[in-house]
Image (cartoon, rainbow, N blue to C red):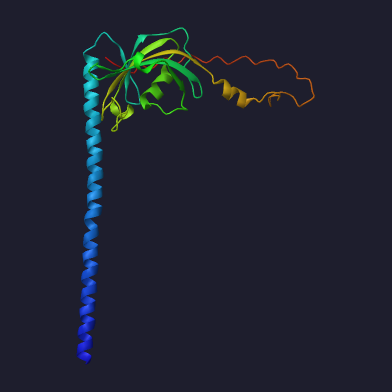
Amino acid sequence: MKSLKLSIYTLLFAVLLVSCKQHEDARRPISRTSGTFMKKSVDRNKKIIANEEQVIKKIIKSNPKTKYYATRKGYWFSYDERNETDLSTPKKGDIAYFNLEVKDIKGNIIYSEADLGPQTYYVDKQDIMMGLRDGIKLMHKNETVTFLFPSHIAYGYHGDNKKIGTNQSLICTVTLRNFVPDPDAAKTATPTGQTPAAQTAAGQTPKPVTPKPAAVKPATPAKKDTIN
């Protein structure tokens, strides 16, 4: 009887041990497969970016008469029309009015200015293509700039679900017609009928403030960030 009980316990222990071993073995490949997939995905994206940048650099070299500027965000641009008189640029919250033409990297038109119509953009407050979001803030009024955008700062892997495909580099020509402060933001900042905090307390006559002369800073030479 004791021998029978011992055999049963031994059998149950063996079954439990085998079950745990199979469970552990079944979980290992999931972790390994996941890590391998991520590494392959990163490597693939690096190759895509490198290949796109090589194509863009070939375009730049094939146009030696056009001066292109490289940016820290990983795109390039050149001026078609430049405004060196008014050097102000759009800032967060401004309303920018511009025209846009979009081409593929071979120069074929995807969206013409007529297709898209006049564009209105609340700077840094609307969801638009990452490259345009950054590029518009570099422009002055009445300038026309051509941007060369790799896909990772254009529409990436998904495209725009219309005419722009997967991992597609783009040539975007932008004319910034004008930009102005958002009038609604100004109303919110200083409600009607209230005196700004910088003035005197309510009921007192504000005293004139003599402005201090602004300190003159030496001009900093512009950095050259170009690809010839």
Quarter of the picture containing the C terminus is top left
Q: Is residue 169 left or right of residue 122?
A: left
Where on the picture, by quarter, is residue 161? top left
> Where's residue 37, x and y in %?
23, 45
Quarter location, residue 188: top right
Numbered marks: total: 0
Q: What residue lies at 43% left-to-right and 9% top-to-bottom?
A: 142
The residue furthest bottom is 1
* Foreground pick, 4 / 201: 4
Q: Identify whether 12 is placed above or below 225.
A: below
Quadrant of the snapshot with the N terminus: bottom left
Residue drawn at (23%, 26%), measured in percent from left and top? 52
Horizontal and vertical percent for residue 192? 68, 23
Q: Position of residue 207 (x, y in %)?
A: 75, 18
The residue lying at 21 percent from left, 55 percent from top is 29
Q: Is residue 205 left or right of residue 66?
A: right
